[in-house]
Image (spheres, rainbow, N blue to C red):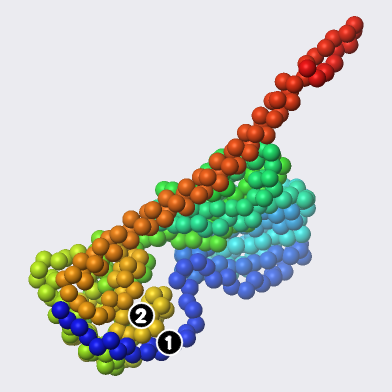
Amino acid sequence: SLSPSRVSSSLVKEKKSAGFADGWRAEPASSLRFRSEEPLSVSGMVGGGGVGSKPVVDNDDGPAGYSLNLYDSKENNITLCWPKAPYECKYELQQKIDGQWTTLSDSIPHSKVMVSKGHLEPNSKYQFRLRRQTPDGEWGDFTNPLSAKTLPQGTLLLDRPAIHSRSERWVGITWEDPEGENSANPPNYKVEMMETGDQGMATGWKVACSKTDTTGIRIKALRPGRSYMFRVARADGAHAGAFSNPSVPVKTMHSDWFRNVLGTSLVNKKGETVDIATLRGKMVLLYFSAHWCPPCRQFTPMLAQFYEQLKAAGKDNFEVVFISLDQSKEQFDEYLGSMPWPAVPFEGPLRRSLADKFGVRGIPNLKILSTDGHVAVDNGVGMLSGEVFQQWEQMAFASQRAEEEAEAAREAKMKKKEEARKNKKNKGKAKEKTDKKGQKWVCEGDTCKMVDS
């Protein structure tokens, strides 16, 4: 057995400006003047995985090769979106007014992929079309006209759906509808989705579920590592077809959890790139440590010896990954040279963000992660032995089963809630039938009327 000192150095956190690993960043909206002198709010959605975050390859969609799409519609405004051009250019947006195409703006910058046209009449139809400059500066063809309709005045919308859970291939969403749930005949719902990165804006909203009587569903058959938004509307009854505001963008997990957490590659002490896929299916030990930390320098040789003993014994179901908190690249390289395992590269903010993500307040710290990326052991620094390693294995490989049980419990809770709604709905229908059966037609002379039986 190997036993290090129980002393732990304090870790000083550096406060840095937050980056945008997921979601979108909204640039300030600007107002552009145009010939009809009506307001056109132009906003750009940029940033990792967000709306219009990447240029798209043109597809065969009308004369322009791309399409103008409806993003949202309200009583007095319509929001449009389109795919970002693969080259620097300007866009021109037109509206059909009194039978004539009228330019709303011909100077929408390349970074903007969404506009909101305001001061419209409720419950009215409008037509729009878009074109962009070609690489040589000439104007290209217009898109096919897009017809859109504002909502009737007084339309009640559902709140935007909330993200319930996610995986690499599905996203679970829920929404609230107090009015519908308290009704004797709860409504059905319709859900639509939009992929918000790459070519998602080129296709617009798609039906994810045409009809459901629940207030939560799991949208399946999604693509790993992609960003999506969802919206919901009542499928019948009052205000049917009026969609909620879109959900916040949510990115599906990569098919391998470690790509979401540790990036795309690691590095070894020789400076060689190590494929992150080598972690697939393994228990991962994240080793937060630093060269300047005396307790770390005491524990590292013990961990290295323990690591080599396990590998020599044929244990290939685990891997250690060094997360450096060193203050310079030189310290990082020197310290990594004493380790037989790979490390997260020193360059970039990922090392520090991992310390924040896993709540590391002192080092050395050894996080034992399960095969699905959950923390099975908060800190494995201490006694190192075969018995301890077996305990790590039991907890690491059991965490996935625990998560599956938790997910099953959440599903059961949602199912119970929906069964209660259905029972309430069925009781309402049963009451209606009882009322009808409790009466009968009685004819006297030339008059027939309904009376209680």
Quarter of the image where one finds residue 319: bottom left
Q: Residue at x 70, y 60 (%)?
A: 117
Q: Is residue 125 above or below residue 363?
A: above
Q: Type of residue at label 1? A: Lys
Q: Residue at x 25, y 80 (%)?
A: 382
User: Which one is closest to the eye, mark 2 or mark 1?
Assistant: 1
List the single residue furthest toward the top. 445
Residue receiving disc 2: 351
| SS at circle 1 | loop
Q: Are marks 2 and 1 in contact (CB under 8 Å)?
A: no
Q: Is residue 399 left or right of residue 422?
A: left
Q: Is residue 91 above or below residue 418?
A: below
**Nearest to the observer: residue 288 or residue 92:** 288
Percent across and percent down for residue 109 are 58, 69
Checking the image for residue 44, the label placed there is none
Residue receiving disc 1: 13
Task: Report the quarter where the C terminus lies.
Answer: top right
List the single residue furthest toward the left. 312
Task: Report the quarter where the N terminus lies.
Answer: bottom left
Quarter of the image where one finds residue 279: bottom left
Q: Residue at x 62, y 74 (%)?
A: 28
Quarter of the image where one finds residue 30: bottom right
Q: Is residue 445 above or below residue 107?
A: above
10 Å neighbourhood of mark 1: few (<14), some, or many (≥20)? few
Structural distance between the alpha carbons of marks 2 and 1 = 12 Å
Q: Type of residue at label 2? A: Arg
Q: Residue at x 11, y 66 (%)?
A: 314
Q: Is residue 73 left or right of residue 293?
A: right
Q: Earlier in the sequence, mark 2 or mark 1?
A: 1
| SS at circle 2 | helix
Percent across and percent down for residue 448 are 85, 12
